[in-house]
Image: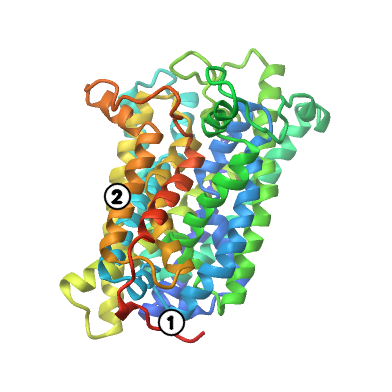
Amino acid sequence: MPHLLDALVIIGYFVLIIGIGLSQRSRSGSVEGFTLGDRQIAWWAVLASILAAEISAGTFFGAPGEGYALRNYTYIQLMAGYLLARVVVSAVFIPAYYRHNVVSVYEFLEARFGPKTRRRSSAVFLVTRLLASGSRLWVPTVLLVLAWKVFIDPKTTPMQEFWLYAAALVGITVLTSIYTTLGGIRAVIWTDVIQVVILFSALGFGLWHLLGHTGGWSALFGAIQEPALIDWGRPDPDHPGAWGWIKGVLESEYTIWTAFLGSTFVTLATHGTDQDMVQRMLTAKNKSQSAKATILSGIADIPVNFMVLSIGILLFVFYQQHPEIILPKNAKGAPDSSQVFPFFILTSMPSGLRGLVIAGVLATAMGSLSTALNSLATSYVRDFHFRWFGEPDTDAGKVRVLRLGTVLFAAFMITVALGTAWVKAHNPSLRIIPIILGIFGYTYGSLLGVFMAGLFTKSRGNDFGNGIAMLAGFLVVGYLSGLDKDLAATLGLGGGIPRPAWVPEIEFPWRILFGTMVTFGIAICFKTPKDKLTPPPAA
């Protein structure tokens, strides 16, 4: 039984996580306890939870896939913007949320502008987070489906793949929703701590194993392609001059300009306006500890991404040294970069280590899933359900609704993940990172623009104007990113709205920046009503 040790490691992981999650049930009997852990979580645990949410299974497989495909570290450039944005979030966003004592972050928008802005923004979060988290939920199941194809049936059809994906993601979602539903945010955070330890161990041992089987650091550095780390961008050859250079930068994914502009706005949106991320920040004892956890998580992202990209580059070296190994192929007949790392895990790692890495994959999936479920339930119940159906008189009644909301969104998440699995099974050449980050790009610029109007001005913006601004931000980003062409092609309606050749089709890291600029610019054209000009609550 060559895989017995792997099975024992994985079973041990599940037992540990479920046990820790269920142990927090008794401390999650109030709304404050279920949603914010009574604001008594240690900063280092909040830090671990932020990392667990950020390092999804999409990163675990997607970033090595980027390293394998690009063979450089240009993806790490984005970390500069990630860290810069965390400083702004810690200095401006978090203190405002603590002053207003919010549970759902969109409660701040009602205090600043009115109920319509709160509901619109919360709805944007609910839809976007559901699609984004659901679409990446299928990622860890890639490993399980690939194991079936490697060890059982290499001639698996797309339809068989879909059903394998379905069974795996339903199992992961059900297990995660059990401890999330019962234990609340405390269960989420303390299981995240364990999951981050397992994740780091899996990545560290994976890198060590590859270094030992490829020739070490010299082989890694010898395989790097230029630009190795910093990409200054390249002009569009069809449009000479300054605009051609700008157009080329906007149509590139990883450049130094993306790092300091595009990724800064991406992180301001995901860490400043997304209930999923902000909710765990608000579990810290005070705004200072929350800021410490937030900024240190940005620093910790750098070695994590260095490890996963190095793994991707070393995978390229390994399979160049072993050309007899047949890698999974995409629709164009080239190696499928998103499956290279899971294929290596299954076929080349020793027993025990393989089980640890598989547990690491499951940890990333369950960590990001549990936080998404808790935040979706919190936002829906606080921003919509209590308004529509009334608020129960007791804490026990309120928590019961929150738990039912968690179960509801678990079902929604499974539905989205099944749809993504269907698309991926029939389009295996799709890249993971752009898919996951791209979903946020269409809507989160509108969300960030409204929050910035509320945080950086005192008398601009109102319910009516914010609605116009958010819609305009979405439409502009959709047009500039080619969403109209994609939808038209899908529906068989041609090529979308005609566009001049000089108009860029922006890549996913730029979408939130443009959405924010348009939304903020329009929102501040409207005055805030006098009844919303009252001073904020005291710190």
Colouring style? rainbow
Q: Is residue 212 visible?
A: yes
- Numbered disc 2: secondary structure: helix
Residue at 61% from the left image edge and 76% from the top image edge: 288
Seen at 54% across and 36% down, the residue is 62
Looking at the image, is mark 1 or mark 2 earlier in the sequence? 2
Residue nearest the observer in this picture, 512 or 472 = 472
Q: On the image, numbered disc 2 is attached to which residue?
A: 471
Identify which amino acid the numbered label 2 is placed on.
Leu
The residue to which callout 1 is attached is 536
User: Residue at horizontal 47%, vertical 72%?
Assistant: 23
Please state the horizontal and vertical placement of residue 196, each as a whole percent of the image: 60, 56
Question: Disc 1 marks which amino acid?
Answer: Pro
Residue farthest to the left, as pictured = 389
Going by the image, does 233 lie left or right of 375? right
Q: Is residue 508 above or below residue 502?
A: below
Number of marks drawn = 2
Decide: few, some or many residues near mark 2? Use Cα within 10 Å; few <14, some 14-19, many ≥20: some
Taking depth in this image into account, of 5 and 511 the one nearest to the observer is 511
Image location of residue 402, percent across then percent down: 30, 70
Residue 297 lies, in percent from the top left, at: 63, 59
